[in-house]
Image (cartoon, rainbow, N blue to C red):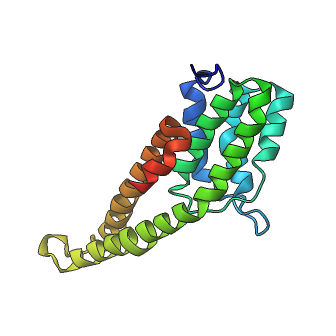
């Protein structure tokens, strides 16, 4: 039979804390720095959930652990952030002897995924979706119903509507799938 450590269930994370973490993910880049990339943003995103999982001293250590170098495409970083939150919730339910190993797994997941996720996200958003939205918006200038004095207001709005619907759906789906999959998020991103 499996050891109790292997079948432990992570403590329940309140939906309000997860929602707060997701909303904070929109500010992931606000404290970007040359030395450590998005590390302050990662700690900021994780803070509401870590606050619910750990007592103050352990929470401070967890936040310090997430101050290591981290840099990736911010829209698809939600896959990694969701997985980190799930793994931290699992870590909170483990006995002390297994917690250090889980910390190393969390760090390895972050380091291992940030490059590939950045490559996928940059190609998806900057090389595919953004040019598509730009071409779509500009091509409307040649469609008769869209011509006229109000065209300058419609074209940028259409660009933002299409681009942000793609961006927001990927960000939200990534966060949810990352939290559900935990360390198995690699398979989700691969698909």
Residue drawn at 52 percent across, 61 percent down: 117
Furthest residue toward front: 1
Would residue 157 be found to the left or right of residue 77 on screen?
left
Would residue 42 be found to the left or right of residue 128 on screen?
right
- 124 or 87: nearer the viewer: 87
Q: Position of residue 133 (x, y in %)?
A: 33, 70
- 29 or 106: nearer the viewer: 106
- 151 or 24: nearer the viewer: 24
Residue drawn at 59 percent across, 65 percent down: 115
In this view, 172 is above or below 15? below
Residue 29, quarter of picture: bottom right
Residue drawn at 35 percent across, 58 percent down: 161
Q: Is residue 23 visible?
A: no
Residue 113, quarter of picture: bottom right
In this view, 118 is above or below 84? below
In this view, 28 is above or below 127? above
Furthest residue toward bottom: 142
Q: Is residue 62 visible?
A: yes
Which image quadrant: the N terminus?
top right
Residue 152, quarter of picture: bottom left
Would residue 127 be found to the left or right of residue 65 on screen?
left
């Amino acid at each position: 039979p499996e050891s109790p450590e292997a079948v432990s269930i992570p403590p329940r994370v309140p939906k309000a804390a997860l929602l707060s973490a997701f909303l904070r993910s929109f500010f992931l880049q606000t404290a970007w720095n040359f030395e450590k990339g998005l590390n302050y943003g990662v700690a900021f995103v994780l803070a509401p959930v870590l606050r619910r999982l750990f007592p103050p001293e352990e929470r401070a250590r967890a936040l310090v652990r997430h101050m290591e170098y981290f840099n990736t495409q911010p829209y698809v970083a939600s896959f990694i952030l969701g997985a980190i939150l799930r793994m931290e919730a699992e870590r909170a339910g483990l006995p002390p002897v297994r917690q250090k190993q889980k910390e190393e797994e969390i760090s390895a997941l972050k380091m291992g995924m940030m490059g590939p996720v950045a490559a996928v996200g940059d190609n998806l958003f900057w090389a595919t979706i953004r040019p598509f939205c730009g071409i779509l918006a500009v091509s409307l200038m040649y469609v008769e119903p869209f011509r006229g004095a109000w065209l300058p207001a419609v074209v940028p709005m259409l660009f933002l509507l299409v681009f942000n619907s793609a961006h927001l759906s990927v960000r939200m789906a990534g966060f949810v799938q990352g939290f559900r999959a935990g360390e198995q998020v690699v398979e989700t991103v691969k698909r």
